[in-house]
Image (cartoon, rainbow, N blue to C red):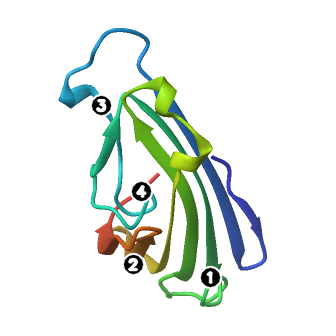
Amino acid sequence: MKPYTWGKSTLIPRVRLAGTLNGNPGPQNLFLLGGFLNLSGYQIGQISGQYVAFGELIYLYRLDDASAAFTIPLYAGGSLEVGGAWNDLDDVTFDSLIPAGSLFVGADTPLGPLYLGAGVSDDSNASLYLMLGKLF
């Protein structure tokens, strides 16, 4: 993950690949997807498996003047996401990847980043989010 900023715009690409090396992990050791900016249409941890692949592109636009004193930085943004989780390596295919995305507004408050957003996936799963704190 490396953010790229120009003017008031920031683009953040993210990639995550993970898998178990051997054995049969218990449910507490599975890799999880779901939640804000992590297949946003799904609830946190709704998708799980021994193998996971995830990629996304996050766009942020600063709504206020960066040089203004005594203002809380405000942002609008969105994400395009694709990923999946599987229990068998033979099931990992491009056709099994799940597309999702989100739209959100955010503020950099004294308590940390605050986000209000909505996410959706291709199979009509949808979620609303109110998050306070660092996400990545």
First in sequence: mark 2 or mark 3? 3
As helix, strand or loop, the secondary structure at mark 3 comes to: loop
* Alpha carbon separation for disc pair 2 and 4: 15 Å
Task: Please name which of the two marks, 4 or 1, marks the residue nearer to the observer.
Answer: 4
Viewer-nearest of discs 4 and 3: 3
Residue 84 in the image, given as x and y percentages of width and height = 46, 45
Taking the image as drawn, is residue 2 in sight? Answer: yes
Apparent side of residue 52 relative to residue 27 in the rendered image (left or right)? right
What's the amino acid at mark 3? Leu
Query: Residue 30 shows which numbered tag?
Result: 3
| Image coordinates for residue 124, horizontal then vertical, percent | 38, 74
Taking the spot 45% from the left edge, 79% from the top edge, the residue there is: 107
Q: CA distance from mark 2 to mark 3?
A: 26 Å
Give whichever of discs 4 and 1 has the lower sequence position: 1
Q: Mark 4 near mark 1, Cβ–Cβ under 8 Å?
A: no
According to the image, label 1 marks what residue?
62
Q: Please report whichever mark, 2 or 4, sits nearer to the chain's N-terminal start.
A: 2
Among numbered discs 2 and 1, the one appearing first in the sequence: 1
Task: Answer left or right for 5 relative to 56.
Answer: right
* Residue 134 vs residue 55, the one in the foreground: 55
Quick check: marks 1 and 3 in contact, CB under 8 Å? no
* Amino acid type, residue under disc 2 in the picture: Ala
Amino acid at dot 1 = Arg
Q: Which residue is mark 2?
A: 118
Among the 4 quarters of the image, the one containing residue 62: bottom right
Query: What residue would you read off at disc 4?
Result: 135
Residue at 41% from the left image edge and 68% from the top image edge: 123
Instruction: Return the x and y of residue 36 as percentages of the image width and height.
Output: 39, 63
CA separation in Å, label 4 and label 3: 20 Å
First in sequence, mark 4 or 3: give its number.
3
Mark 2–mark 1 distance (CA, rounded to whole Å):
19 Å
Q: Looking at the picture, does residue 70 appear above or below residue 56? A: below
